Image (cartoon, rainbow, N blue to C red):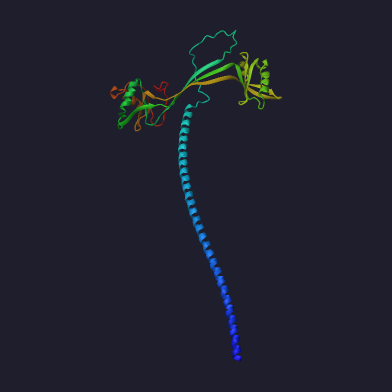
């Protein structure tokens, strides 16, 4: 009986143990189902993320290609623009160089060299006793500035009396000269290309009724200046007189005063400076005659001397300049050498020389 009771207890224990394992198995199965479901969801999510990543990569690749194309286009455009800028800069430099060259050629100094003035004609003056028209002093000057020709070492200028002889010598071009036993020299003859010549006419008119007052005080209105100028230069004690008109020039800090009668200008300009009182302060002003200058008939030309020949290739000659000049003149005076009557010869042996030509560009001075 005791063994049977013990076996029943063991059987009951094993049943309970089986029930617990069945419950545990059921729980594990449920967990496995949940895990499988989660696994499926995770796979779907991974697949979706993979597809999105692939789409993003494709989009990024397209954008990258588009960016590269845009960068290449911009680089090509930039290269074209740089090339265009370089061409424009070169054109600008060329134009600036041309402008500078012409500007230097056209530039005229403020002071012209002193020159003797010859009177060529006399005109009878009309009786102006009843006519109050001012007799202004007028002067017309014609100025010619010839570009000098620089004679280099081993060169000579040969001027003939006859233009045809010079052209004949230039046409033959090559000559063989011998200077006192020295080796024969091959001398080339060519035309003389002269630099540009500038010619213009300067018309100068000095008014007998108008002056310029300079160095006026600053900061005064035109009406006040006019009144003060009339009061100052109307006074006979300083050589003034009755005033016709006053024009103020604030930009140049000056004024133009026109008098009714001639002679006042001469009296005022004898003293270069005068006292001018404005706003209770004394100022020193300068009075000058009104001079109007006009530049007319500006001409710029260049040419080739018709009677002068340029000889080159005489560097190896070792004689004195005068001796070489004499031998050149003797050689080219002979008709057998194609020459003729020589008017002047200039040779440069060791240092450069400057040759000046007359206005007609035909002969040396």
Q: Position of residue 140 (x, y in %)?
A: 51, 17
Residue 276 in sight: no
Compared with 167, 13 (above or below) is: below
Q: Position of residue 253 (x, y in %)?
A: 62, 25
Q: Where is residue 86 in the image (x, y as percent from the top left)?
A: 46, 39
Residue 12 in sight: yes
Location of the C terminus by quadrant is top left
Q: Position of residue 162 (x, y in %)?
A: 34, 20
Of 266 and 254, which appears nearest the observer?
254
Q: In which quarter of the image is residue 333?
A: top left
Compared with 130, 273 (above or below) is: below
* Residue at left offset 56%, top offset 17%: 206
Of 113 and 36, which appears nearest the observer?
36
Tally of numbered tags? 0
Of 319 and 59, which appears nearest the observer?
59
Location of the N terminus by quadrant is bottom right
């Amino acid at each position: 009986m005791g063994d049977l009771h013990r076996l029943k207890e063991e059987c009951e224990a094993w049943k309970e143990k089986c029930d617990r394992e069945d419950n545990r198995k059921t729980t594990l199965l449920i967990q496995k189902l949940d895990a499988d479901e989660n696994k499926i969801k995770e796979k779907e999510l991974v697949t979706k993320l993979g597809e999105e990543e692939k789409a993003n990569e494709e989009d990024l690749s397209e954008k990258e290609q588009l960016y590269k194309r845009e960068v290449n286009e911009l680089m090509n455009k930039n290269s074209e623009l740089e090339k265009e800028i370089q061409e424009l800069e070169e054109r600008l430099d060329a134009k600036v160089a041309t402008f500078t060259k012409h500007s230097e050629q056209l530039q005229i100094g403020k002071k012209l060299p002193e020159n003797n003035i010859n009177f060529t004609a006399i005109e009878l003056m009309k009786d102006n006793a009843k006519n109050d028209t001012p007799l202004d002093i007028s002067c017309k000057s014609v100025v010619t500035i010839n570009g000098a020709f620089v004679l280099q070492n081993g060169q000579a200028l040969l001027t003939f009396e006859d233009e045809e002889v010079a052209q004949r010598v230039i046409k033959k071009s090559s000559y063989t000269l011998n200077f006192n036993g020295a080796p024969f020299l091959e001398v080339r003859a060519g035309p003389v290309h002269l630099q540009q010549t500038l010619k213009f006419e300067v018309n100068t008119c000095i008014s007998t009724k108008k002056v310029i007052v300079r160095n006026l005080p600053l900061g005064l209105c035109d009406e006040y200046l006019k009144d003060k100028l009339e009061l100052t230069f109307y006074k006979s004690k300083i050589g003034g007189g009755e005033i016709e008109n006053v024009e103020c020039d604030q930009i140049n800090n000056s004024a133009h005063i026109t008098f009714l009668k001639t002679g006042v200008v001469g009296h005022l300009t004898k003293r270069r400076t005068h006292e001018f009182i404005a706003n209770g302060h004394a100022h020193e002003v300068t009075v000058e005659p009104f001079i109007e200058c006009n530049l007319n008939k500006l001409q710029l030309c260049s040419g080739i001397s018709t009677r002068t020949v340029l000889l080159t290739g005489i560097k190896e000659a070792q004689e004195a300049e005068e001796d070489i000049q004499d031998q050149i003149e003797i050689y080219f005076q002979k008709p057998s050498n194609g020459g003729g009557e020589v008017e002047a010869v200039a040779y440069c042996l060791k240092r450069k020389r400057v040759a000046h030509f007359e206005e007609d560009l035909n002969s040396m001075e």
